């Protein structure tokens, strides 16, 4: 824990400069607009410890796999979103002396992330070694309106001297990933153009051949008056700079406006990148910094309208939840089905910036409720686009006839991960991808999606499960051997209940999809049957046989589902009885000891109960929760939210709140001492779920109806959240004993509140007592 | 399969030069003397494909571990026996033209390894690009008499020219391992000395700081007359050479004698290495090549007297078994308890040249029966020397109070391997190490060993097992979770029968050791109790409780021991029903598919039955064999011999012979297309066991009596083997229906032949009919 961030409702504020916190702050003060993003690095030179990080969505490098002992089926590479050109740079020299916060004396340092309007402001006073003092205010943002770039306003006031300030604005593309398997550089220069006032660098990724043009255009004012100093132009490999000198008098303010852009060959022909970059910069510099900033604030207001959560009486909680929502929206906007949500978003290099099942399990629910349906639809289409690769991936492992295994980690659909117990065995990810389709349809009613995209994905996944089970003569049941469940603290287990359960559910839902298609989209169905060589009768009857005879472990004595074979052979110890010095066990225990312990990393049986809650009685849920939670160490940031939601479900409001707290400020308070590596983007969605599903009891079951059953943590006065459902946009306000639903849209919606159905007309509100 | 080796009783012969076979031949024609060894490289320059390889026993480098995903407890490095200075080199220029078999036209090429006398001879005629022809005969050996070096005689005959032949004799220490995790060089030069006639290079291993002085001393004759040509001396970093020109006339023979030595700081003070090297070379060059070679033949004759197997009527088999015995004796001589037997010996780099459980499971039985007892005793002391490290290793994994886990792979006692399913879980190796102590004592009767060394090792191992089991409330038994058995084709299994069985056996044997010590070595026992803080009553009673209540899976229906939990949930397929194109599965299947199949890599349940045969009825052995063998793919070279022995036991002589064949010429015929990497040294012991234990039914049970029950494969006329037991040396000759035992020693021995006890007096023989 490192709680140096000041508490404000809408702002993340750091006061005072502590180099020891710099990497953490760089993560926290990251900016992004879905297309690109970067860490909270300084514009001026900084020679202290820093992870310089800028990232362009979808631009990756296949870093050659590093492995101790090769196993058949391992992928050749791990795709990494690349650390890209640094466009922030504005170096400052005062009479030849470099401004560098590692060598200057720094006072009144403050970073302030304005989440409401989407910009970062930094102010400080620096005394240079010579004694000259400057006051600096930098304001910058990545535009979500003109989303191929952003702008910086960098103001320097001469506090105690008159002299020359030299500004050097540059684009530096000679960037290395800190995370590189073989210490290679991943970028090569393609072209550059450098003229007084604007400069462009086109770099190409090795192997993958993505081109990115990074451009800058700049202007200088003195005390608000536009200046036209002589501009010096200099270049070297993968680097372009402009510099200019401004003569200042004590008290003068010299300001640099730097407009920047990244134009990627993902979105434009390679031959047009520079001209597009020029056009972009001409457009935004014409618009000007102030106008851009105003539009940014307006666009962010729209986002908040859909996704904000208001908490009264608890600024710390308020700040935490908004930080999470802000970062979800910085990372993914849902406009491009080729993009996805990396575990660190644009805030660091760890985990390669690629797609995990986190997307379907955690991010999809968030965007389903806080964004237009096309956002989630694009996330689903992302997987549809990768279907062919998933079929190839399964074929590598010996599956056939269109069976699809989606990768554990991917950028372009190919598997990247190389631990056999994960890569080959943590196959429940396939279930989450199928469930996301179901989840989307039950929230939106858009079953046309099945016809257009969904059925093929469901079929490939179900075919995989069908081949992945085998008949056990010992049990006289179908079994699923050699899997790793969501609890990665047990590997290569047999009959993981969660995996087997979701596998049979996939068979059930794919069967249902066939019925829907036959009924509503008969022509398209016929085409799909032919295209996918679907043997309806034979395949469905096989699924039905497996569903009927699937082994799903149940312990009669305790009345709980058995996480996996052999679980009750483990020594049964509760986390509360552990020596706290041994926690987290992942840092203190060898892997074999973790594996043979009964400790659970994150929800496993409970993950299944969470997904299919309506199929279990509250009594059953409680029994399983009471058994498994005390054995769970929550050593994944994805664990507490599911437990918070289930605790809420079984009426344990205190525990629900406790779990919520464990991740709500995970990064802000650097809970796991790893925020320096980047933010836990995907788990941020989980915190939102803990509030809306855990506290407010939001559910959508098979019938598609929105259900709420809110309670309020006793620490809070009131809370409000916005939720979009089937075209309606609701503002829900919860106070002790009462819930008010305000329909801010024109679409009437019937909602079940505490199991009582109420219809809220458009532009209307109702209040229900608990 | 690549069967280009010609069949002779005592010789390995390659005729004709095929560069495609060169790496295979380099492995096959390796020489070693226990202290050093090297591959069958050429003395003259060779610019074609080759793995130049020379190795000095015990001199290793800790190569930094390479890993994809780090797990707690992984070791920092992998110790590798290093590719050391090349001392073979004698380059030849004919009138300035280099002799290089990659560029010359080669005729009558022949490599001939004389196993009886322990030397390698190579002859060929080469036509150089200019048309000049030479005939070359090279003879070389590593002395097992003067075991810090060897000698080369290199004869060149001018076939069709008169002119100048320039010989360059050198030591090249600028050597890289092909197998290096980070492409680093591992040697640095310490010193060199280069004078006309002799030269010395001292190199140091990085990190470990071993020093090795490699020296050479040379002489030239022309048609048998000693020459004294002018010698040119040249050096560069890590390299020393002498060269001289000899004028020859057509038909002349110029001969180089090169004496070489490796003096290691393992055996001498660093400051004395060069002087020791000089002394060695002075001594052997005085002795002269012919005399050295004669002594070599005599010393090898002694080795063969103990270890030879004679097969009449099957030259192929005869050659195969002698090649195996020869290489076992080249690799390990048993004079130095710091050394051990790497899987590739001195013949390649693979597996790092370090110690596996192969030593105890396969090599110990071989040396027990073919060498003086001190040889195996040194192998046991090797592990005793590593006891402290084994205790540290266990402590890293959370064990305490003196529990010892021996490493899976080691050089100096520290674990080197880094796959969690092996490193942390393939713990049955501990059992093999305990069993080797028992095996030694039942063969030799030397229970003093328990007092001197053995008990402490047994105690550490037994303490480990005691902590490694846990009580299962589900089974009401002790269980052993999360292990990998000898069948590495299943990982992280629960209750592997073999591991659990040998664990309880360790408890039993350690308990018996306590009784023996108390009875015969009471004072020493008291000291051991104090030193090891042994709580006799408490610990023994815990062991007894575990032995009584240990879960050992047994399948009533099939009457077989259950390899591990869940085995009968696997789809049951027999190897004979597999598509042969899928074999070996380790090359064709992804790891998860292998894991969830019922295919077994090597003897697992059957390994236990092999070790503890006398505890099972033949009927039981047959049931288990008939169940498990058909599911075994034998994808380890260590598998067939155990199956051969058990097939012999249950009277299936045909299968016993079939399994014997699978490894008897494994390397000679390049059965697995991997001989190029080096020879399968440790599995060579297995072939010897297949003959002596499988065909001749040799056993020693708890009572220490030598038992024989021979049959003869119908393909053979007769076979003889030598066996040493309790001071007696027997020559056993088996023909159809008859066995003759000749006691060539003075010590009378009672032997059970076909369960009939007969006493063979010294210098006497008896014949028993079947």
Image (tube, coloured by chain):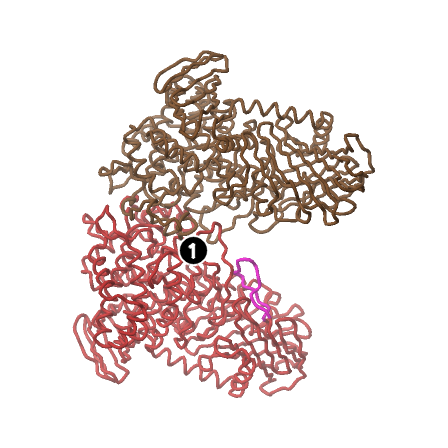
Chain colours: A red, B brown
Write down the residue under mark 1.
A73
Q: Magenta span: helix, strand or loop, mainly?
A: loop
Give the magenta part as a residue range: A173-188
Dividing the picture into quarters, in which one does residue A687 lie? bottom left
The answer to whether A64 is drawn above or below residue B439 in the figure is below
> Visible in this render: residue B355?
yes
Dividing the picture into quarters, in which one does residue B242 lie? top right
The answer to whether B52 is drawn above or below residue B647 in the figure is below
Residue A540 x %, y %: 23, 63
Q: Is residue A179 magenta?
A: yes
- Left or right side of B66 for B536: left
The answer to whether B438 is drawn above or below residue B29 in the figure is above
Q: Is residue B397 magenta?
A: no
Residue B394 x %, y %: 43, 39
Q: Which chain carries label 1?
A: A
Residue A273 x %, y %: 54, 79
């Amino acid at each position: 824990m490192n709680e140096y961030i000041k508490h404000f409702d809408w702002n993340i504020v750091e006061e005072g400069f502590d180099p020891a916190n710099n990497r953490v702050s760089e993560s926290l003060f990251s900016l992004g607009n879905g297309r690109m993003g970067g860490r909270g690095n300084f514009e001026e030179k900084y020679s202290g410890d820093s992870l310089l990080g800028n990232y362009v969505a979808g631009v990756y490098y296949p870093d050659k796999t590093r492995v101790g002992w090769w196993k058949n089926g391992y992928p050749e590479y791990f795709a990494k979103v690349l650390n890209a050109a640094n466009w922030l740079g504005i170096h400052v020299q005062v009479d030849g002396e470099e401004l560098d916060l590692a060598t200057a004396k720094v006072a009144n340092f403050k970073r302030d992330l304005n989440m409401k309007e989407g910009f970062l402001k930094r102010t400080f006073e620096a005394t240079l070694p010579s004694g000259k003092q400057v006051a600096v205010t930098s304001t910058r943002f990545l535009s979500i309106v003109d989303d191929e770039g952003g702008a910086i306003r960098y103001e320097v006031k001469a506090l105690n001297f008159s002299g020359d300030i030299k500004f050097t604005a540059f684009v530096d593309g000679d960037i290395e990933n800190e995370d590189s398997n073989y210490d290679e550089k991943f970028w090569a220069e393609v072209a550059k153009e450098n003229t007084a006032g604007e400069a462009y660098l086109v770099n190409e990724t090795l192997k993958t051949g993505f081109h990115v043009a990074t451009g800058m255009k700049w202007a200088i004012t003195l005390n608000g008056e536009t200046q036209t100093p002589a501009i010096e132009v200099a270049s070297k490999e993968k680097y372009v700079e402009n510099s200019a000198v401004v003569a200042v008098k004590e008290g003068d303010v010299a300001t640099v406006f730097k407009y920047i852009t990244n134009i990627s060959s993902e979105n434009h022909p390679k031959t047009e990148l520079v001209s597009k970059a020029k056009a972009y910069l001409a457009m935004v510099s014409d618009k000007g910094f102030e106008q851009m900033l105003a539009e940014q604030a307006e666009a962010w207001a729209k986002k908040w309208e859909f996704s904000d959560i208001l908490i009264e009486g608890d600024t710390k909680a308020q700040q935490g939840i908004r930080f999470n929502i802000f970062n979800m929206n910085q990372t993914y906007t849902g406009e491009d089905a080729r993009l996805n949500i990396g575990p660190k978003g644009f805030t660091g290099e760890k985990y390669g910036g690629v797609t995990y099942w986190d997307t379907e399990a955690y991010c999809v629910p968030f965007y389903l409720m806080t964004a237009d349906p096309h956002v989630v639809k694009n996330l689903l289409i992302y997987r549809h686009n990768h279907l062919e690769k998933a079929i190839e991936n399964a074929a590598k492992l010996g599956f056939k006839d269109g069976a699809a295994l989606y990768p554990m980690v991917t950028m372009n659909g190919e598997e990247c991960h190389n631990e056999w117990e994960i890569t080959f065995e943590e196959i429940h990810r396939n279930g989450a991808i199928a469930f996301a389709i179901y989840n989307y349809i039950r929230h939106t009613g858009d079953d046309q999606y099945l016809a257009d995209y969904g059925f093929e994905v469901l079929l490939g996944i179900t075919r995989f499960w069908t081949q992945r089970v085998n008949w056990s003569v010992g049990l006289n049941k179908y079994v699923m051997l050699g899997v790793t469940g969501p609890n990665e603290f047990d590997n290569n287990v047999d009959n993981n209940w969660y995996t087997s359960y979701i596998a049979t559910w996939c068979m059930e839902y794919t069967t249902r999809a066939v019925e829907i298609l036959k009924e509503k989209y008969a022509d398209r169905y016929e085409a799909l049957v032919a295209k996918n060589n679907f043997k309806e009768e034979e395949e469905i009857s096989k699924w039905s046989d497996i569903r009927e005879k699937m082994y799903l472990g149940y312990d009669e004595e305790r009345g709980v589902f058995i996480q996996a074979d052999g679980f009750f052979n483990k020594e049964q110890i509760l986390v509360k009885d552990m020596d706290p010095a041994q926690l987290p066990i992942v840092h203190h225990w060898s892997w074999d000891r973790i594996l043979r312990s009964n400790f659970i990393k994150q929800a496993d049986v409970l993950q299944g109960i969470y997904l299919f809650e309506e199929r279990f009685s509250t009594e059953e849920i409680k029994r399983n929760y009471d058994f498994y939670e005390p054995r769970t160490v929550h050593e994944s940031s994805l664990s507490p939210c599911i437990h918070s939601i289930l605790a809420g479900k079984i009426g344990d409001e205190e525990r629900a709140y406790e779990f919520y707290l464990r991740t709500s400020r995970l990064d802000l308070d650097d809970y796991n001492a790893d925020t320096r590596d980047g933010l836990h983007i995907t788990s941020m969605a989980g915190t939102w779920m803990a509030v809306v599903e855990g506290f407010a009891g939001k559910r959508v079951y098979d019938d598609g109806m929105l259900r709420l059953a809110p309670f309020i943590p006793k620490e809070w006065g009131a809370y409000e959240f916005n939720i979009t459902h089937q075209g309606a946009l609701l503002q829900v306000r919860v106070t002790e004993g009462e819930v008010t639903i305000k329909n801010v849209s024109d679409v009437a919606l019937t909602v079940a509140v505490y199991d009582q159905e109420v219809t809220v007309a458009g532009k209307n509100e109702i209040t229900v007592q608990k």
